[in-house]
Amino acid sequence: MDTSCDPRQTAIAVLIENSRTRRPLDAVIEQFSSLMDTLSRRDRSLANALIYGTLRWQNYLDWLIQPFSDRDITTLKPDIIYIMRMAMFQVVFMDRIPVSAAVNTAVDAAKRQSHKGTAGFVNAVLRKATEQYNTVALPDQEKKPELYLSISASMPITLVRKWISRFGFDKTDLLCRTINEIPPITIRTNTLKINREELIYNFSNDVEHIAPTSFSSVGISFTRPAKAIHETDSFKSGFFQVQDEAAQLVTEILSPQPGERILDACAGLGGKTGHTAQLMQNRGTVIAADTDAAKLERLAQEMDRLGITIVKTCNIDLLKALPADFQGELFDRVLVDAPCSGLGVLRKNPDSKWKLTKKDMARLAIRQQKMLLSAANLVKPSGLLLYAVCSCEVRENEDVVEWFLDQRRDFRVKNHFPTLDAALKNKSVSDRGFFRTYPDNLDMDGFFAVLFENFS
Ligand SMILES: C[S@@+](CC[C@H](N)C(=O)[O-])C[C@H]1O[C@@H](n2cnc3c(N)ncnc32)[C@H](O)[C@@H]1O
């Protein structure tokens, strides 16, 4: 598809590719980064708004389109259904876009993707749907509360069902609606180079709604940056990393100390690695490990940008025999920021809710248990092990913890959070010492973390 310099065509191309792959949305957008970079700032933000909005509101959009189609629209080819959803999203949610522009772009895209007949079908359905969608009633909230929320808040019904039985209708309603809001951008000040006040001052003319985060002492949030943040001087100078407040709090709970030997066992691109080294004042050793060698290469460049010198990368698979240098000295603290469903970060990755299957959840939970067990072997006597996931699902939280405690009787939960603000502790730490955040009550990502102590 020729998408050159057209934000709508670019958005459609991303949505179509996203529907074909199980990779997360941010990876798909990165695949299209050279195309995105050809767009003006305004067009790039339009393309992003279309991609994220269409994926956030997918169920609701389908509900509005379906009455005007004689075919079950979910059986259409993914490229056609995404073309239609995106047109509908523009009409329902973006008042600056004329209906004719939204429909014409969709029909043109359908012509390019498919044959003439399909474009005719898209044209006929969208013309009626965009004119009459206001007449489509939502499911009855009293009689069918699960279906009502699944449509009105655009969530898979299986998730809504699970959350209503766990939290009740009102919290589920609020949670779903918060998840559909566009989150602010949150960054973490690199205190090795600058303090938070100075960094806020650096940004203040180029962003909107800038404020220090409520609970992390080094976080800053803002909206609508004047340019892509990786193009700012502050970014190039290594003054911050982009990181949600909840993720910042996880490293604060680990509380790494200067001079220690720390393992970040699932380091990824190094969000928590950078924070760990920062809290250690760049003194001691951090081993940043991951199965993905390409991520570790980027992590090493990221540490250079931040001026961090104590991080060594190591390409390992926690589920296999570890290399010889892991057999020697054990670690003071080990962080397992395990791969998970990502259901706590749906504000940023709305596609995950549509991609995740029951089988995935079961597979992930087993992997999390095994990774935690393997990491426990690397913790010194009296050392600490932190398990974290960006998901608040019991299957990936309590169930993993209970299983682990049963396997390793020499570990116990350390229910002690000296680094956390008292008000936050009240809202986020359970009696058993489980830390959990939700977007609806704290305006941050959903995260779960437990600190274990090796008392052997
Ligand atoms: C949630 S992400 C980590 C995010 C990172 N800690 C951060 O703060 O930016 C989980 C990471 O675990 C890695 N991973 C998956 N399976 C692994 C395994 N068996 N051993 C080590 N790392 C693994 C993935 O490549 C991924 O980068």
Image: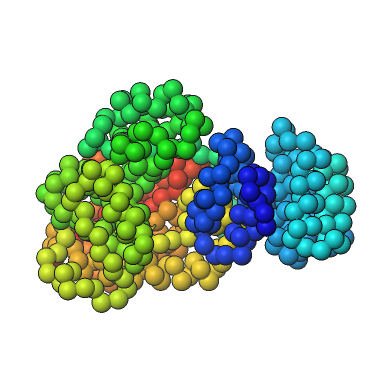
Q: Where is residue 183 in the image (x, y as percent from the top left)?
A: 51, 39
Task: Tell me which residue sits at (22%, 63%) in the image.
Answer: 411
User: Which residue, as the protein is rendered here, is positioned at the far bottom?
Assistant: 321
Which residue is rendered at x = 14% and y = 46% of the image? 283
Rendered-image quarter of ligand 1: bottom left
Q: Which residue is drawn at 52% across and 50% down?
A: 34
Percent position of residue 409, x then y: 23, 68
Residue 296 falls left or right of residue 356: left
Q: In which quarter of the image is the N terminus?
A: bottom right
Q: In which quarter of the image is the C terminus?
A: bottom left
Q: Where residue 292 sits: x, y (%)? A: 36, 65
Residue 359 visible in the displayed image? yes
For the residue pair 239 and 191, the one nearer the viewer reads as 239
Establish if 41 lies above or below 161.
above
Left/right placement of residue 205 relative to residue 9 reads left
- Percent position of residue 352, x then y: 55, 57
Please say which color scheme the image uses. rainbow
**From where the camera sits, is residue 151 visible?**
no
Count of numbered marks:
0
Q: In which quarter of the image is residue 116?
A: bottom right
For the residue pair 431 and 28, the one nearer the viewer reads as 28
Q: What residue do we see at 71% from left, 32% from top?
A: 96
Q: Toward the viewer: 298 or 425?
A: 298
The answer to whether 332 is drawn above or below residue 207 in the figure is: below
